[in-house]
Image: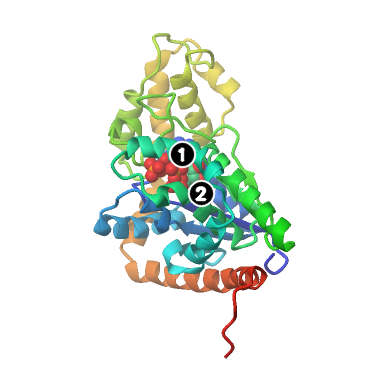
Amino acid sequence: MYQDKKVVFSGVQPSGMLTIGNYLGAIQNFRTFSDEYRCYYCVVDEHAITVRQDPAVLRRRTYETLALYIACGLDPTKNVLFVQSHVSAHAELGWILDCYAMFGELSRMTQFKDKSAKNADNINAGLFTYPVLMAADILLYQTELVPVGVDQKQHLELARDIAMRFNGVYSDTFVVPEGYIAKTTAKIMSLAEPTKKMSKSDENENAVVRILDPRDVILRKFKRAVTDSGSEVRRGEGKEGIENLMSVYSAFTGASMEEIEREFDGRGYGDFKAAVGEACADALAPIQAEFARLSADKAYLEQVMKDGAAAAAHDAQRTLSKVRRKIGFTELRR
Ligand code: AQP
């Protein structure tokens, strides 16, 4: 705990331009904790290199992701916003925790299986141990709550297991974190294949709506979204595409699923898709304007990075020192 406040930690990989899945499943919820909790929101660039990245693009996206955090309402004076590779304690605790995570449990991670299938020519050890680094990210700050999309639930369970295992061996060291998963937006689906998660690294541009997509692109992507052969806007068997669009519409307008069914009763898919596109574009417009303003001020973003790294490194060091002592590493005396 920091200054008697409970801690929230979460991160986003700069592995592509962020999607409305990242926004609705994660970032949108981040700011709800800023007043009550000590919040750490990290751009997890060390996770991003588990998949091959172009260095110049990774650098640019790291700045963009930080700027998007701020543009989405995360005030750097109220939240610790930082870049993972600027705080070496993450990699250090990651290695230590590797020695407390089991090969069998890592082999069961579905994201490892999915990403291995997608990157068959680069199934590197980092891809395999990714959830342990994620556990280190979380446990370093004595985190109580981790707001994430449902795809990260399994990794979060692992972080809890590692924390409990370590605490069991050495006495209480880590807070055991809880996940915070938003109800209707926990998994926004691909617009092209509505049974698959929307992912920022999807090669099919029509499958994803990006936070920075221009209005006409957003409208076009929703218009083309794959649905079903019916015409009624309602939930049900075989209607994953429509249900996904309803979740998006609900998230951007605040309407409940029942209200949406009533609002679009008898109006057909064309009308509904246009309304979803409009609602999404309207909600993203202020974020896009703020992003453009911030992107023009690199000095400001660098200052945020610097301040965030200093604050995070200071707090992370307290946990790391405790861990080092408990496992029997020697200390260098000054
Ligand atoms: N489609 C989604 N619906 C709801 N939440 C989502 N998240 C990701 N996609 C959706 C949540 O966004 C946060 C950041 O995700 P990440 O960058 O750590 O990586 P990811 O989960 O692997 O996201 P992507 O977009 O699928 O990235 P790539 O394509 O690089 O693998 C997390 O809280 C995640 O749950």
| Picture residue at 30% right of the left edge, 41% below the top | 214
Q: Which residue is mark 1?
A: 111
Mark 1 CB near ligand 1 (8 Å cut): yes
Earlier residue among tags 1 and 2:
1
Q: Amino acid at mark 2?
A: Pro
Q: Could you say which is closer to the camera, residue 59 or residue 166?
A: 166
- In the image, which disc is placed on residue 131? 2
Residue 175 falls left or right of residue 66: right
For the residues bearing labels 1 and 2, Cβ distance under 8 angstroms: yes
Task: Locate residue 141: give its quadrant.
Answer: bottom right
Q: Amino acid at mark 1?
A: Gln
| Picture residue at 49% right of the left edge, 53% below the top | 11
- In the image, which disc is placed on residue 47? none
| Picture residue at 44% right of the left edge, 47% below the top | 128
| Picture residue at 54% right of the left edge, 22% below the top | 260
Q: Can residue 247 be spotted in the picture?
A: yes
Query: In the rendered view, how is the structure colored?
Result: rainbow
Q: Quadrant of ligand 1?
A: top left
Residue 170 falls left or right of residue 196: right
Residue 307 % position (x, y): 48, 72
Q: Could you say which is closer to the camera, residue 235 or residue 8?
A: 8
Secondary structure under the numbered disc 2 in the rendered image: helix
